[in-house]
């Protein structure tokens, strides 16, 4: 799937269908007599809104640490469709007055894009009190192919399209303006580019068998991405997070995550001030068979920009993800999820697809 965008939209669509067929065939196989329980924890699925994704977001985790002297390798794919604006007005991609007419100190936003984010996560449990990790993200924005599907879905359930009909389908354009000056002005889709690398540490706080566990972590985002290509903010971000997991009985687990991200100034300039992001997440996972889990999680993210009458970049966004985890072995798990927005503030993707593969060694 890492090669999807290299061969065009039709191949991307075909590969998504093939992955779904493969997943269904795997899940329908005859269960083995030995245990292949999926690895525990929330979907490793961070906020996918293109503007907030420039900054350091929460990577959901379990309250446990890895077993001692164990490493974990994760490859994550997320494909999302986003259409958001401060207010519909013709075709915002060509109407310059749409942005420059905003009052002073107010933000104006337009985002019409589809994003593929491929991330490689590496984690190592070094000692009884220390786990370290890093994330290498690769990101591509484009016009995509899902606009028609999203519009038809909204019409079927009599939901608003938020101005989608007034812009051409499968276009790409992301703009953020303040005081009549563009902070982001991106109309050209680009190939895969490296995003901002994230370094992490994780420490245990409380452990009670496999029933209740709490841990904390710190993360540092380095400005290795490029704001002109929408792969990074251009600033250094720092995050503190708390992870808790509770398993009242073997088949059910509940996870709660809380994080606070302090954001460095985009482009190292005071022209576009930002504020910290607070993220909450709750996840429920249910062990349906020895190899299959059903899972749902909800997350909220505060806006990274100061208060604005126009919104929506200052408002809290809510998303829900639902799907399954499938255990190939005691050390390898596949996770599949669909992402849907819960808030109607024009600050979340309309829909997304998440695929993750997790390995642990030994």
Image (cartoon, rainbow, N blue to C red):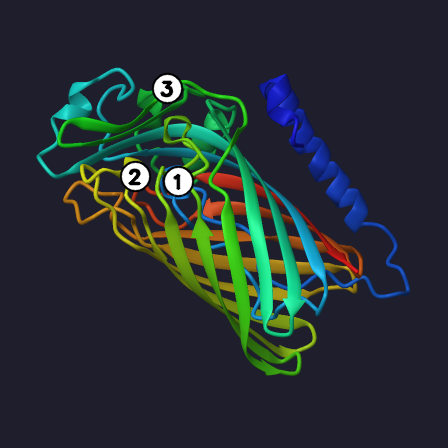
Given residues 331 and 233, the one toward you in this image is 233
Camera-nearest residue between 158 and 51? 51
Q: Position of residue 337 (x, y in %)?
A: 59, 48
Of labels 2 and 1, the one closer to you: 2
Which percent across, then down, holds residue 62? 58, 66
**Between marks 3 and 1, how big is the CA–CA gap?**
17 Å
Quadrant the N terminus occupies:
top right
Disc 1 target residue: 54
* Label 2 element class: helix
Eyeballing the image, is 155 above or below 7? Answer: below
The answer, for residue 43, to whether it is visible in the render is no
Residue 14 versus residue 274 in the image, above or below? above
Q: Secondary structure at mark 1?
A: helix
Do callouts 2 and 1 mark residues in contact (Cβ within 8 Å)? yes
Label 3 CA crowd tier, 10 Å (few <14, some 14–19, many 20+) = some
Q: Is residue 29 above or below residue 15?
A: below
Going from the N terminus, do you reach mark 2 or mark 1 first? Answer: 1
Q: Which residue is mark 3?
A: 187
> Between residues 32 and 226, which one lies in front from this camera angle?
226
Of residue 56 and residue 257, the one placed in the foreground of this image is 56
Give the mark nearer the N terminus: 3 vs 1: 1
User: How far is the residue under mark 2 from the one under mark 3?
Assistant: 19 Å
**How far apart in space, not on screen, are marks 2 and 1 (Cα)?**
9 Å
Q: Quarter of the image holding residue 166?
A: top left
Q: Which mark is residue 266?
A: 2
């Amino acid at each position: 799937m890492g090669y999807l965008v290299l061969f065009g939209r039709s191949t991307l669509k075909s590969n998504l269908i093939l992955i779904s067929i493969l997943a269904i065939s795997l899940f329908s196989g005859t269960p083995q007599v030995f245990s292949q329980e999926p690895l525990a924890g929330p979907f490793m699925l961070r906020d996918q809104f293109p503007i907030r994704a420039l900054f350091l977001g929460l990577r959901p985790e379990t309250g446990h640490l890895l077993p001692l002297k164990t490493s974990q390798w994760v490859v994550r794919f997320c494909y999302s469709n986003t259409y958001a604006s401060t207010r519909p007005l013709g075709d915002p991609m060509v109407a310059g007055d749409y942005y420059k007419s905003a009052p002073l100190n107010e933000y104006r936003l337009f985002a019409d894009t589809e994003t593929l984010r491929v991330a490689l996560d590496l984690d190592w449990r070094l000692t009884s009190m220390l786990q370290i990790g890093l994330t290498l993200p690769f990101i591509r924005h484009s016009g995509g192919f899902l606009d028609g599907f999203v519009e038809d879905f909204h019409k079927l359930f009599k939901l608003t399209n938020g101005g989608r009909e007034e812009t051409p389908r499968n276009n790409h354009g992301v703009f953020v303006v303040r005081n009549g000056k563009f902070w982001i002005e991106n109309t050209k889709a680009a190939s895969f580019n490296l995003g901002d690398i994230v370094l992490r540490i994780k420490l245990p706080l409380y452990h009670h068998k496999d029933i209740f566990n709490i841990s904390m972590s710190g993360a540092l985002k380095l400005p290795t991405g490029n704001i002109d290509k929408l792969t990074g903010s251009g600033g250094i971000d720092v995050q503190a997070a708390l992870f808790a997991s509770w398993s009242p009985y073997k088949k059910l687990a509940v996870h709660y995550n809380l994080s606070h991200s302090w954001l460095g100034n985009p482009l190292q300039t005071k022209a576009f001030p930002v504020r910290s992001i607070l993220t909450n997440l709750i996840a429920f996972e249910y062990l349906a068979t020895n190899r299959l889990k059903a899972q749902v999680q909800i997350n909220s993210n505060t806006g990274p920009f100061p208060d604005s009458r126009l919104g929506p970049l200052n408002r809290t966004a809510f998303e829900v993800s639902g799907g399954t985890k499938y255990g190939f072995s005691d050390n390898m798990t596949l996770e599949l999820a669909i992402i849907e927005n819960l808030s109607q503030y024009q600050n979340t993707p309309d829909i997304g697809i998440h695929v993750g593969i997790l390995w642990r060694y030994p």
